[in-house]
Image (cartoon, rainbow, N blue to C red):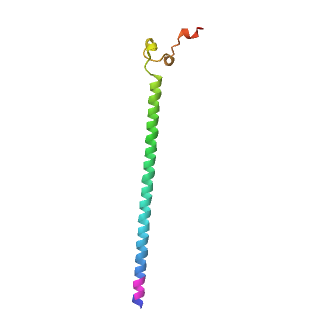
Amino acid sequence: MKTVTIIVLVVVVVVVVVAVVVVVVVVEVVVVVVVVVVVVVIVVVVVVVVVTVLVLVHIINFMRYRPAQEDEAHSGGYSRWLVGYRDPSANRLL
């Protein structure tokens, strides 16, 4: 009877140790996956923000220094209102 009790105790201890090891490994894998997902989300957000800012800066620069239209050809290739040119005829009453 004593031998059966010892075998049962050994089996219970082995099962508990294996269960604890499995739980620890699963928790570590979940933590690693969560950390990787958080890092990937942060990187994606940073890339989207940087690309958006670069595109906006490009659009703003293009709008500020857009090529002249036909009626602005004498202004040196840039819009008059951007380079500080003021048309004196704008003050005249029609």
Q: Residue at x 44, y 63 (%)?
A: 27
Residue sitting nearer the eye, 73 or 21: 73
Q: Residue furthest right?
A: 93
Provide the residue span drawn in magenta: 4-8
The percent position of residue 69, horizontal first and vertical second, equals 44, 17
Q: Residue at x 41, y 68 (%)?
A: 22
Quadrant assignment, res 4: bottom left
The answer to whether residue 78 is above or below residue 44 is above
Dominant SS in magenta: helix
The answer to whether residue 78 is above or below residue 51 is above
Residue 75 in view in this figure: no
The percent position of residue 86, horizontal first and vertical second, equals 53, 13
Residue sitting nearer the eye, 64 or 72: 72
Quadrant assignment, res 16: bottom left
Please check the rendered image and state whether residue 7 is part of the magenta-colored stretch, yes or no: yes
The answer to whether residue 59 is above or below residue 14 is above
The percent position of residue 50, horizontal first and vertical second, equals 45, 38
Q: Residue at x 44, y 58 (%)?
A: 31
